[in-house]
Image (cartoon, grey):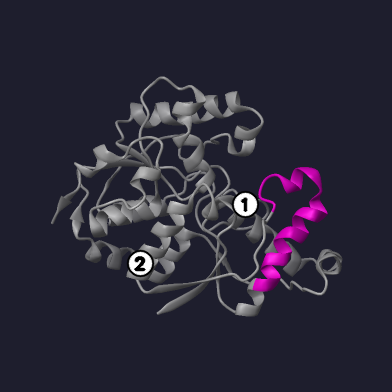
Amino acid sequence: MVNLTYYPGCSMKTSSKFYETSLKEIFSFYGIGLKELDNWSCCGASAAPTIDEKIAYALTARNLSLAEREEQHLLAPCSACYNRSKVVNEQLRKDKALRDEINEAIHPLKCLGTTEVRNIIEVFHEHIGIERIARSTAYDLSDLKVVPYYGCVLTRIMKMDAFDDKENPTSMDKLLWAAGSEVTGWPFKMECCGASKTLTNKEATLRLSGKIMDMAVTVGADAVVTPCPLCQLNLDLLPYLGRAEKNLPVLFLTEIYELALFGKLAGGTSHIIPTDGLLHKVKKK
């Protein structure tokens, strides 16, 4: 049994609640225990750094200080939460002056930068593994053609090593292949979906996410798969943003494993773009 400290972030408790349900179900199946971080708060994501860098560091450091007490790896499934947590943790560990300044701001809490921050793709690789995944599937997904969408912040972590290639990652491709789906190469796996611009400039998100969806349709995919709540939401919102062209279902990575293990999607009705058509491509082995 592997135990991890789990930082859900804001999305997993609101717009992406079905992602959290899926995550817990799949990790439980593979024997990974999740202990939700007590008294966690918003990490600031992409908004706080544009307003005040010190506040942004303090928001994330507060959560990291709580995680350090658990003495376990910290799982942050949201790409923005992962990126911020990874960056702040590394900077506070290396920069004593910055560490002292931020610890003064979050006193009586204290962050030393000792927590190992992990994203969902890393956990699948490190604690489950490709071979075990391939052996465990009960449903055939070979008729399901998917494109992996990493988004623009998951691997592009500035001034530090990333867990995968920063511009052409393949770690999620391998996980999708292990689940039995047909993984299609495409050039938009790292393009920006518009991120939080959806709140202030819907046209920007419609344009950026629309291009991603266009390419997924062009390469003949049945679905787009992502680990990021905001990426999933922006692409799934396209019909409401005014897109009249064809839209494909946008699944979370764990939902592919729901199909491969159980032949169903527990959160299927939570999707805006219908997912019913995908179930016809899933066959019992």
Crowd tier of the residue under label 2, counting other residues whose Cα lies within 10 Å: few below 14, some 14–19, many 20 or above: some
Please state which amino acid type lies under the numbered disc 1. Answer: Ile
Q: Quadrant of residue 171?
A: bottom left
**Residue at horizontal 53%, vertical 35%?**
193
Q: As rendered, which of 9 and 231 lies closer to the eye?
A: 9
Task: Locate the C terminus by quadrant.
Answer: bottom left
Q: Quadrant of residue 98?
A: bottom right
User: Whole-percent x and y of residue 5?
Assistant: 54, 71
The residue that mark 2 highlights is 129
User: Whole-percent x and y of residue 246?
Assistant: 36, 24
Please state which amino acid type lies under the numbered disc 2. Answer: Gly
In the displayed structure, would residue 203 be above or below residue 179?
above
Of callouts 1 and 2, which one flags the residue occurring earlier in the amino acid sequence?
2
User: Whole-percent x and y of residue 237?
Assistant: 48, 33
**Residue at horizontal 48%, vertical 53%?**
17
Q: Judge whether residue 174 can be spotted in this image.
A: no
**Residue at horizontal 50%, vertical 55%?**
164
SS at mark 1 in the image: loop
Q: Which residues are magenta?
A: 44-66
In the displayed structure, would residue 263 be above or below residue 73?
above
What label does residue 157 carry, if any? 1
